[in-house]
Image (cartoon, rainbow, N blue to C red):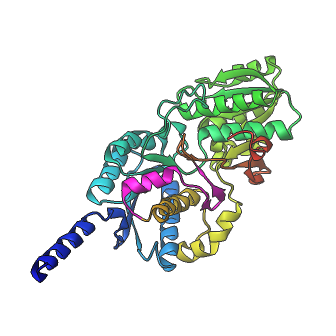
Amino acid sequence: MPRPTALVLSVCLLAFLCSCVSPSAVRETGPIHLGIYADLSSSGARDGNDAVKGAQLRVEQINESGGVGGRMVDLIVLDMKQNPTEAVKAYTTLAQERKVTAVIGSSVPNAGLAVSPVADLAHVPLVSLSIDDRVTSPDLNPEIPDATGPARQFTFLVQPTAATIGAGLAAYAAEHFQLQRYATLYDPSSVVSLIEARAFEAGIKRAGKVLAVSLEMPPGDYAATLDAVKAAHAEALFVCGSVEQNAALAKEALDVAFQPLILGNQSWYAPLIDRAGAAANGVVFAMGISPDDVGLGDISVRFATKYGEKPRTAVVPGWDAVGLILAAVRKTGSSSPQKVRDALEILTGFKGLEGTFDMDRKTHRLSQLPVAIMRIWSGAYTTLEPRYVSRQSKSGSTK
């Protein structure tokens, strides 16, 4: 074969082989861009800023250790105030204009509900900090929290949900209190409150206890409500309203002779004591993370050095959301939004501040997340168990 012809064939063969190389085999370079939107200037600004600080600190730590595969991480922060419409705008800006790998969403429940369907259209993963189960499970029936339905394709949750909090508190109460009859009091205008109540009720029944009565929050005083709880012979009352509703119930319960053990949701945490005073004494409640959690202690020096204060609980979801996304980047070897989404869905062994967890592919939530069991005593919050998981869950008999 003449030399020129052989050379041409060799060049053509090389070009063909190069065209067959999978794009994933090409090493990606440059920074990995992540986005986060939060309420930085409205009524939820403290929690929003704490989440951003947690995310920023995690990015800083990762970059100091060489980034991800040698690639530095860049975090873009936007303020959505307390407005779901602004949250959608922020997500869209980050996903479409700033071309981020993934977006970390606000803890504001309505924001998560507004943005999650947009994420399915934009095909850029949303890791939401919300506790509303419907953010990843849009077909969930609040009356039956276990009936989740299919998950949003591009949305994931990183902290305990309303159902996790309600079920966790029910399991703790059944294991630690010698009580048989329980009542619930929820706000019918709040789906999160309803989910917590129904999850608690299901947990009590699973434990062989009795649900004596389930009541809606009244528009006025709670005298009739407490009378109904007494008439049902309930020994404990799970109150899962807002801070204002919970404080009002506590004050009224203090003034009546019948005083059941009051159990509560995350809204019994600060600033509840400021609103209820001594009336809140003795309440046992569940929340996502304890202020005494060892995970917060692990980052306290770094956090205090950068921000001049101790880390609060809202720091944790921000820190873990960054870690979750970058764990998916490492797994897939790419910062492509689609590939990161696919890796997030099957992620196992994710190491967060509170332990090591797997992603539940059915719900797009981390499986077997613990809850913190707290108690209000002598005008202060005390931690009964910082990372409570029911005995049944530990045994592996439930997901």
* Quarter-of-image position of residue 27: bottom left
Residue 314 drawn at (x, y percent): 57, 56
Residue 341: say if magenta.
yes
The answer to whether residue 304 is visible is yes
Q: Is residue 301 left or right of residue 70?
A: right
Residue at the extreme front: 1
* Quarter-of-image position of residue 19: bottom left
Q: Is residue 31 left or right of residue 277?
A: left
Residue 132 drawn at (x, y percent): 53, 39
Q: Residue at x 34, y 73 (%)?
A: 29
Front residue of this view, candidates 123 and 241: 123
Front residue of this view, candidates 230 and 220: 230
The quadrant of the rendering that contains the N terminus is bottom left
Relative vertical location of residue 217 with respect to residue 302 in this rendering, above or below:
above
Q: Residue at x 35, y 51 (%)?
A: 91
Region of the chain picked out in magenta, as a range? 334-359
Relative vertical location of residue 103 with respect to residue 3 in this rendering, above or below:
above
Q: Residue at x 83, y 28 (%)?
A: 235
Residue 181 drawn at (x, y percent): 82, 25
The answer to whether residue 38 is visible is no
Residue at the extreme bottom: 3
Looking at the image, how many numbered discs can be counted on the residues?
A: 0
Q: Is residue 54 left or right of residue 204?
A: left
The quadrant of the rendering that contains the C terminus is top right
Residue 312 drawn at (x, y percent): 61, 61
Residue 191: say if magenta.
no
